[in-house]
Image: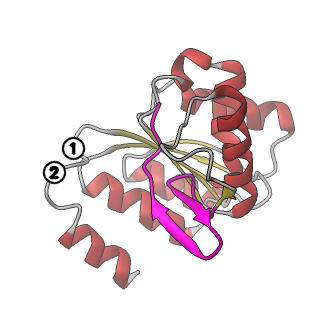
Amino acid sequence: MPVLHRLLGERLGDGSLRGKRIAVVVHLEAKTACLALALRDAGAEVVAAGSNPLSTQDAVCAALVERGIDVHARHGVGAEEFTSDLLAVADTRPQLVIDDGCELTRRMAAQRPELYAELEGISEGNDHGGSRAFARSRRTGVFRSRRSRRTTRAASTCSTIRTAPGRRRSQPCSR
């Protein structure tokens, strides 16, 4: 966690996240709770949900709630409740989403398109979810790159796009 605390002090202490609504949809375990709390400490309004009901730790959820984070998750829930929890997060109208596996993003696009269109940015933590986000962007045109003809595949986050083998350029997700 030293890197996270350094980031909080050096980069996020300027108030740039103050008032931003951020949805954190990740495996709810101790290390990701630290991320949610750091974002809150940087001034963001944070709401959290688990990206996988089987990895959600109820004790972590309870600790986040005690510290003022809105949490929509419980260990071992079925598919219907899992989706309901994610849609409850969507209904908080997040501006930014940290989304493991594009779980929230996919559901917002399909079931809350008006809220999906309002998103300012999405960060995806792995290639699988990045591939989902990239495929959706190709179908819908919601996220565009200035060099979309040269883009070959999504990298580990939708904010980094491969433009040629071995070369990356930073491109914020935009509408």
Whether residue 174 appears in magenta in the rendering, the answer is: yes
| Residue 71, image x, y percentages | 53, 43
Single out the residue that lies furthest toward the top.
Answer: 114
- State which region is magenta: 155-175
Q: Where residue 38 is drawn, which disc sits there?
A: none
Q: Residues within 10 Å of mark 1 (few under 14, many from 20)?
A: some
| Residue 61, image x, y percentages | 56, 54
Q: Are marks 1 and 2 in contact (CB under 8 Å)?
A: yes
Single out the residue that lies furthest toward the right.
Answer: 78
Secondary structure beneath dot 2 equals: loop
| Residue 56, image x, y percentages | 69, 57
Secondary structure beneath dot 1 equals: loop
Identity, as a three-letter code, of the amino acid under mark 1: Arg
Q: Residue at x 69, y 36 (%)?
A: 138
CA gap between label 1 and label 2 equals 5 Å
Q: Where residue 18 is drawn, which disc sits there?
A: 1
Q: Quadrant of the N terminus?
A: bottom left
Whether residue 141 appears in magenta in the rendering, the answer is: no
Horizontal side, residue 104 vs residue 81: left or right: left
Whether 102 is drawn above or below 120: the answer is below
The residue to which callout 2 is attached is 15
Single out the residue that lies furthest toward the front.
Answer: 149
Single out the residue that lies furthest toward the bottom.
Answer: 2
Identity, as a three-letter code, of the amino acid under mark 2: Gly
| Residue 140, image x, y percentages | 67, 26
Query: How many numbered callouts?
Result: 2
Whether 126 is drawn above or below 92: the answer is below
